Amino acid sequence: MSKFAEREVTFTFNGETFKGVEGQSIAAALMATGVRELRKTRFDGKPRLIFCGIGICFDCVVVIDGVANQRACLVEISDGAKIESQK
Amino acid sequence: MIAIIGAGPAGLAAAKVAAESNSEVIVLDSAPRPGGQYWRHRDYVQGYKSHRASGYLDSIIGSKNVTYIHGAQVWSATRGKGAITLNYLHEGSEKSITVEKLILTTGAYDRSLPFAGWELPGSMTPGAAQALLKGHGVIGGKKILVSGTGPFLLPVAVGLAEAGADVLGIIEAHSPLRWLRSPIALILNPQKALELLYYLRKIRKYSLKVYFGSAVIGFNGSKAILSKVKSNLESKGKVTEIECDVVAAGWGFNPDVTLGGILGCNQKVDRDGTVIFSVDSEQRSSQQNIWIAGEATGIGGADLALAEGEIAARSALNDSIPLSLKFKRFRLRLFATALQRSYPVGNGWQGWIKPETKICRCEEVSHSEICQSVTELSAQDSRTSKLFTRAGMGLCQGRVCSRNVSEIIAGENGCKVTDQERISYSNRPIAAPISLGVLADGINSQ
């Protein structure tokens, strides 16, 4: 078992700076720091995190660099990415 | 040229055969890395017999005649004269490729049952907990319960425990004694006993608690409600509370049949209510030059998927299929049937949910709204209820809720879900959301 090379990546989520490991999904990198809410729902304003984790359920959608409906469980973090909760 | 869609066990097994044959092959996979949900990995693969994965991965990545495109999501496909065109999203734009032959190995995803609080952060599928850990090196929470039914709960719980997570228990709805109903499947598959022993040793090593005949029927973000359940999943009323911040609950799998459905491949309803493809002894679908292998032809696990993938590729290349390989598929299919018999998902879960429990997560449609569409608006199937309530019309296109919505409506109407309805709710006209802008760019560039 070879340990993967860990390169640190810096990004922002709702204006706050976070660090993650290259290759991690946005959801994973945020959850690793204890984040428990990626967005609030449209109608009831209830918090959502990840659910299926493999791109099926679209519960974890976020806005990445201005592009909405991106699945945080699939998209890998990139240096300088600006991520926001979807309204 | 042969295209293989999916790089899980079935797709990799097919690609390996094709790589060794010197035919031109393209593998399109939606994930950033090969291996599928079963062998998802970063630079290494862990788990029972996972060393097998590297052999397959090397064969496709090192081969001159195999082109492997990761992060390619095939969103639609068409059949023409002797050719199949696949349209896929890759690196932000739409691309297409035309091939003579197609092997579909699109896999499956966790089946979820709703319960009070299942939409809260911390409630996820075992597949999600597994993906976070194996794919991204992250443990989903501090205190984790793994719940549901079926053997998949074992690698998830054990994997988490090995990574240092506090796994409070494995909550399995069924009794292991149900396996005694399938003696022939057990006798023909002694290797499965070794796999079970592997996990039992790990369960002992990490002192994991296993609760049989129980299910998580409620969650509030910091506490789960555990209930004893009957074999149809109906709660026996005896509940206990366990403090935890993650409930990873899964109830078997839904095969992903979308692409084959778009291409017109015949489907049928399996014993367990899942919709699968009808294939012949060489994994050929009802459409010429389209083969289907793995979970989309019946949930059966990685070993069966490997056998089917190899058979499909051999058939596509007009190679002979050894009898031993066909026998392997036969005994693994018997085992898959035994799994269905041992871990059935009855309708008793409908008693767990509260009127306000959301059944459609995307459109936030509650159980009471769905029931009202039946009692007040006379909806008799999920399609009608969907029009009234928007259940199943969100971004996931009903992948998570449509089966549950159908079963709730059938329950309210006092009837059973028809095969026609099951096939209807399992199919969708496009396989992945695509923005009109990206679509228009693709058209302009042609």
Image: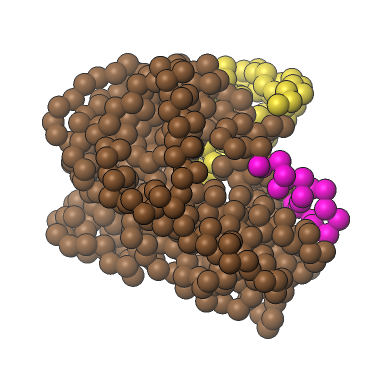
Chain colours: A yellow, B brown
Which residue sits at x=72%, y=60%?
A: B17
For residue B386, side relative to residue A66 (left or right) = left
Number of numbered labels in the structure image: 0
Residue B443 inside the magenta-drawn segment: no
Percent across and percent down for residue B383 are 32, 63
Percent across and percent down for residue B275 are 41, 62
Percent across and percent down for residue B95 are 73, 60
Residue range (magenta): B52-69
Nearer to us in this view, B201 or B272: B201
Which residue sits at x=72%, y=55%?
A: B16
Percent across and percent down for residue A29 are 61, 24
Locate the N terminus of chain B by quadrant. Answer: bottom right
Which image quadrant is residue B23 in?
Answer: bottom right
Q: Is residue B379 above or below residue B346?
A: below
The residue most toward the right is: B64
Locate the C terminus of chain B by quadrant. Answer: bottom right
Nearer to us in this view, B349 or B364: B349
Is residue B302 in sight in this rendering? yes
Which image quadrant is residue B430 in?
Answer: bottom right
Q: Is residue B18 above or below residue B134?
A: below
Which residue sits at x=66%, y=42%?
A: B53
Nearer to us in this view, B225 or B174: B174
